[in-house]
Amino acid sequence: MPLPSLNAIRAFEAAARLLSFKEAAEELRLTPSAVSRHIRSLEQALGVELFERGFRQVQLTEKATHYARRLTDAFNVIRDATEEVSVYGPARKRAQKRVSLSINSTFMNLWLADRLPRFRAACPACELEVSIHDDTGKGGNPRADLRILFVREDEADASLSPLISLIILPVCAPALAKGPNGLRKPADLVRHRLLHENTTAWWEEWIAGVGVKGVDAKSGAIFHDPSLAIREAVNGGGVALADNIMAEDLLARGQLVTPFPIRRAIPSCYALAVRPGAASLAGVKQFHQWLLAEIAKHKRAMHLT
């Protein structure tokens, strides 16, 4: 069949990605009615309905979902190819040095943020554009140059490169490990408050794994932000389970201690996704190389293989 109007295809891709004719119109600098007309013409050309139109909202039909995803990928390829061939002028050089980063909040707040001064010193001409994502689905902004994701180690996705495997270990403020009631062995947890990250399952598995009896793994506070659980531990509010990325800096500064040297591997890791076409950009190369060097330092500091 002949290719439909590229303007109609572009309008559909934007509306599908944003699930809003109004926002698509703003992005494309059109009116909502113009976007609607473009999409109607595309539906007529294809002979299928692309949207289920409701009151103040639209949803993609099943066929349109796959079509929209492939169009987004195609427009990203076109954009990347255009950027790569446009080598003239200072604007292009500045764009090559700006790196967009979509990142897991825990990795950013408890590990990466305090290392960024070293990156600025190493690459003063490179600027970052950072957005935070949660860990639902694949996570992150697919248009970001780089995404750092919290995933299962058996994630069967060739686009992801593992950065660091994770172990978990109990951590607490130094004061809780001192005195007659101090934490010295896992059985001592019975006298201390447990701090949970999102669910009690982590502590339940840990306690069962080390064979501790008499500790109520479901007791204690639950924080749906890992950084808050760790902050509560720093403030002496109880004992948390932290992974190596969360714990490294706070252990090094003496704000947290490991009351007993028990480490357990978990089937999760942090992984890196590079946007297709972005790997050749100068700023992306610099940040990627710097990040890998920092990860290597982390492994040495935490005695990880």
Image: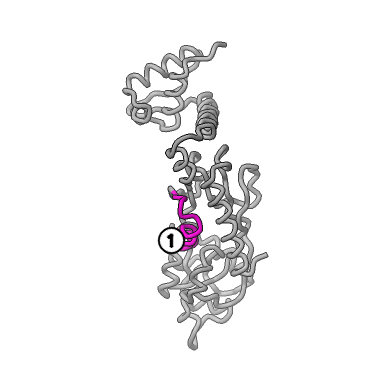
Neighbourhood count class around disc 1 (C-alpha, 10 Å): few under 14, some 14–19, many 20 upward: some
Farthest residue toward the right?
305
Q: Quadrant of the C terminus?
A: bottom right
For mark 1, give the secondary structure: strand
Farthest residue toward the bottom?
180
- The correct choice, above or below, for 278 with respect to 122 in the image is above
x and y percent of residue 4 in the render? 50, 15
Farthest residue toward the front?
89
How many numbered circles are shown? 1
Mark 1 = which residue?
223
x and y percent of residue 217 in the render? 53, 67
Q: Name the residue: 58% across, 79% down.
A: 185
Q: Name the residue: 50% across, 32% down.
A: 86
> Majority secondary structure of the magenta segment?
helix
User: Is 291 or 205 nearer to us in this picture?
Assistant: 291
Residue 3 colored in magenta in the image: no
Quadrant of the image occupied by residue 51? top left
- The correct choice, above or below, for 75 with respect to 304 in the image is above
- The correct choice, above or below, for 281 with respect to 174 in the image is above
Q: Name the residue: 56% across, 74% down.
A: 214
Residue 127 colored in magenta in the image: yes
x and y percent of residue 107 in the render? 50, 57
Q: Quadrant of the N terminus?
A: top right
Residues drawn in magenta: 109-128
x and y percent of residue 166 in the render? 60, 60
Q: Is residue 197 visible?
A: no
Q: Is residue 276 left or right of residue 102?
A: right
Q: Is residue 206 visible?
A: yes
Kind of residue at disc 1: Phe
